[in-house]
Amino acid sequence: MKTATMTMRRRLGVLFGAALIAVTMCATPTRALAANTANTSYNFNFSGTGATQGTAARLKTTSTVCYLRISYLGLNRMNFYIDGSKSASGSWVNRTRGGVATAYYTGHFSIHNYVNENGESYARLTAMSPSGSGAVSGMWSPDSNENNTSLN
């Protein structure tokens, strides 16, 4: 047989649990959601100083940073660019904040850009060898809601 004390404890427990869930949800920071965060691979091989290569066009749906993971860097540094266009077939323009994003080591990075701010819906990652022959590879996505070290 239930006593009034047991019923009251059960009700308080349920009430406390609901309050704890509500406080947890309100206290959890939320990040701006970015739509095209799927990572795709890139693998560039350069045969001299000033050589460039770029990825295929990707839809860029927000004004967030681009995500860049460098898994292999076979030169002492690499210049990266985020190009923007109104169509997937091109007329590409460098939209990298500051003009260039230079990496000196492997890791996870962000590249600030102005693709959406210029009314463009497509982005591509481009790299340029500033010092000789070598290779660079990794993953990238045009939109990111991660907080990584900025290259620019």
Image: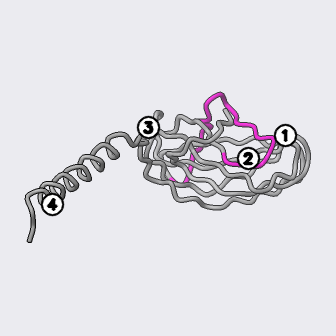
**N-terminal label among 2 and 4:** 4
Q: Which residue is mark 4?
A: 6
Compared with 111, 20 (above or below) is below
Instruction: Give the distance between the C-alpha atoms of the residues marked 3 and 2, in whole angstroms.
Output: 23 Å
Main SS of the magenta segment? Answer: loop
Instruction: Give the distance between the C-alpha atoms of the residues marked 4 and 3, in whole angstroms.
Output: 63 Å
Instruction: Give the distance between the C-alpha atoms of the residues marked 2 and 4, in whole angstroms.
Output: 68 Å
Residue 65 coordinates in the image, percent (x, y): 54, 40
Q: Which residue is mark 3?
A: 119
Instruction: Quarter of the image for the C terminus: give it.
Output: top right
**Residue 127 disc label:** 2
Amino acid type at image mark 1: Pro
Q: Nearer the viewer, mark 4 or mark 3?
A: 4
**Relative to the observer, which residue lies in front, 127 or 23?**
23
Left or right: where 70 falls relative to 14: right
Left or right: where 53 falls relative to 1: right
Instruction: Quarter of the image for the N terminus: give it.
Output: bottom left
